[in-house]
């Protein structure tokens, strides 16, 4: 079967750095997305990785290792508004999106 | 990008009734999707709404329970039929402006459904 694993919940301090991991086992791989979802709101796009390595976009960076079936989202200089759920989603060989359950990130002052 | 609106934003319904959710996009898009998201759970794709043809349903979802209309490239509806408390969930529509499902998707604000 296809599986996406993310931690259920993480807590971090304002101003700090946090890394949210995502491991996947899917039938093929055609890219990995990270989405941010604030409580009661729709998911919004953060990043897309299809090649190995680190993609940096401001305070957010996303890393991919296809050989390890692994990605992480790195958030720097955390702000209170970063409190949200972070969803990892993988595009499989049939170009279907497989969604993880999301990681709820709690930022404390 | 795309701006998506959904109606209603939330509803409380009685068991056995049906609810139709509307999704409106501010531009023409090829691919529209309907998802369900239970609290604390991942997004589950219900179906892909195709303009001019029947929707394509994922395993576990059938047209009789979740009929979908797609009359044009900016609008779609999802009906949740003969509702039971297990249908209580958030229903989201999304679009892929690039024309392929595996590119970035833009989501509507969701419809929070409670079935009593």
Image: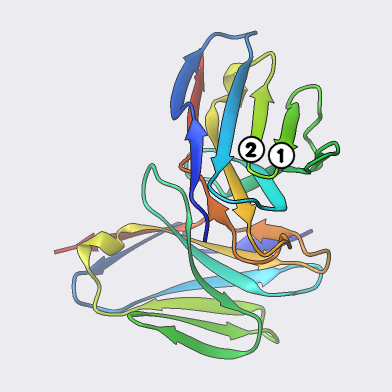
Task: Answer whether labels 1 and 2 touch (C-beta < 8 Å).
Answer: yes
Residue occupied by mark 2: B75
Residue B95 versus residue A56 in the image, above or below: above
Pick out the residue farthest to the right.
B53
Which residue appears at 81% of the width and 38% of the height? Answer: B55
- Res A6 label: none
Task: Tell me where residue B54 sits by quadrant.
Answer: top right
Locate residue B106, reporting x and y percent: 54, 55
| Residue A44 located left or right of residue B81 | left
Report if residue A32 is visible in the image. yes
- Label 2 environment density (alpha carbons within 10 Å; few <14, some 14–19, many ≥20): many
Name the secondary structure under disc 2. Answer: strand
Which residue appears at 63% of the width and 43% of the height? Answer: B74
- Res B72 label: 1
Locate residue A86, reporting x and y percent: 45, 61
Locate residue A58, reporting x and y percent: 35, 82
């Amino acid at each position: 079967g296809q599986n996406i694993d993310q931690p259920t919940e993480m807590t971090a301090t304002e101003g700090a750095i946090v890394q949210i991991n995502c491991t996947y086992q899917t039938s093929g791989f055609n890219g990995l997305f990270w989405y941010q979802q604030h409580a009661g709101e729709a998911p919004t796009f953060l990043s897309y990785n299809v090649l190995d390595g680190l993609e940096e976009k401001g305070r957010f960076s996303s890393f991919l290792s296809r050989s390890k079936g692994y990605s992480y989202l790195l958030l720097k200089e955390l702000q209170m508004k970063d409190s949200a759920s972070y969803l990892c989603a993988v595009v499989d060989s049939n170009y279907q999106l497989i969604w993880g359950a999301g990681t709820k990130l709690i930022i404390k002052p | 990008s795309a701006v998506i609106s959904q109606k209603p934003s939330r509803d409380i319904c009685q068991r056995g009734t049906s609810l139709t959710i509307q999704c409106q996009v501010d531009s023409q898009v090829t691919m529209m999707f309907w998802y369900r998201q239970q609290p604390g759970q991942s997004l589950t794709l219900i179906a892909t709404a195709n303009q001019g043809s029947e929707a394509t349903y994922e395993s576990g979802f059938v047209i009789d329970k979740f009929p979908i209309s797609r009359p044009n490239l900016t609008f779609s509806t999802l009906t949740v039929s003969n509702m039971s408390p297990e249908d209580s969930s958030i229903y989201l529509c999304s679009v892929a402006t690039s024309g392929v499902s595996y590119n970035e998707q833009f989501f509507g604000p969701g419809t929070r459904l409670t079935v009593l």
